[in-house]
Amino acid sequence: MKSHDKNWLKLMVACLFILPLTSACVPEGGKETVKETGDPNKFEVATSIATLEFDTSNAPDLKQWTKEKFAPAIEEWVVKLTDVMASDGWTPPSKIYFQFVVVKLENADYAPAWAVPSESRVSLRTDWFRENLNGEALGSTIHELTHVMQNYWTEGANGKNCPEWASEGYADYVRWVLFEPESKGCDFVYLAPDKYHYNDSYRVTAHFLGFVESRFPGTMKKFNAALRDHSFDDGKFWKDATGKTVKELEADWKADLKKTAAEKKAAAK
Ligand SMILES: [Zn+2]
């Protein structure tokens, strides 16, 4: 994440991507809702939740991929996430913007994509997407869509009780555990269970969250809700939600990682 956080309302959240994407989620009939805007490099997709705007002005060569893969995936997942991420008092955004942007050479260390949740806007690095269309491109857009839907950084809250490891871990949980589990993007944790901690953020936290949800279904809905209404307390939340402290859950997770790693090793022989 790049925290250009002079103003939390304009907080940008982003992530790093390493492993290959192995599948795409394309809903049936998605193209029927595409609406041209008059600008050949900009189009809109109407969903039951939000209107999605896709701007490929800076990357006309990515327009086909955007129409055939990117837009249909977002169209499907903005509806799914509205259910998965529902919480009391929360209203999903009515319009979400996706724009390919050109990053100057001196900013080459910028993340591949980033979100400004307060504006329901996602920026996508043109150069990175061109190189990763058949790899991590699609999954990264779901991670950023999750940040827009989280909208944890509301006015007056200033990020209170919303640790970065939790927001990034949850965004990667949506991506790797819910959207593309077949990619096994978090499986590296089996290689060294003792090395990782539940709050290591991104994929490690995503794996932990997936483990907790599998043992205590419904916990992730409470987790997202607590982060969104700024009531999250790491020392209290887990016990209230599961009956176990986070340290107990982490110990259970590590024991399971070791057990699974041993089983994988035995099966490989
Ligand atoms: Zn992120």
Image (cartoon, rainbow, N blue to C red):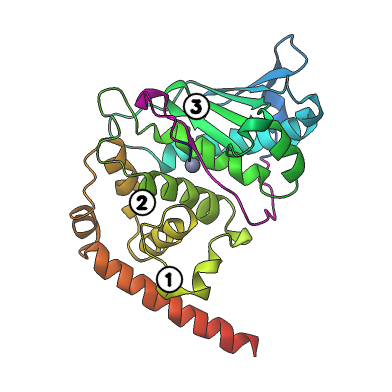
Return the residue nearer the eye: 228 or 247: 247
Q: Which residues are magenta?
A: 3-26
Mark 2: secondary structure? helix
Mark 3: secondary structure? loop
Residue 76 relative to residue 10: left or right: right
| Mark 1 vs mark 3: in front | 1
Residue 195 relative to residue 247: left or right: right
Packing grade of label 1 (10 A; few <14, some 14-19, many >=20) is few
Q: Position of residue 125 (x, y in %)?
A: 66, 33
In this rendering, is residue 131 above or below 30? below
> In which quadrant is the C terminus drawn?
bottom right
Q: Earlier in the sequence, mark 2 or mark 3?
A: 3
**Which numbered circle lies on residue 49?**
3
Q: Residue under label 1, please give it.
A: 195
Marks 1 and 3 close (CB-CB < 8 Å): no
In this rendering, is residue 136 above or below 54? below
Marks 1 and 3 sit apart, C-alpha to C-alpha, by 41 Å
Mark 1: secondary structure? helix
Return the residue nearer the eye: 115 or 53: 115
Q: Position of residue 37 (x, y in %)?
A: 70, 11
The disc labelled 3 sits on which kind of residue? Ile
Q: For ligand 1, tell me if the residue under mark 1 lies within 8 Å.
A: no
The answer to which image quadrant residue 176 occupies is: bottom right
Marks 2 and 1 sit apart, C-alpha to C-alpha, by 24 Å
Q: Residue under label 2, please give it.
A: 220
Q: Position of residue 121 (x, y in %)?
A: 52, 25
Residue 55 relative to residue 48: left or right: right
The disc labelled 1 sits on which kind of residue? Lys
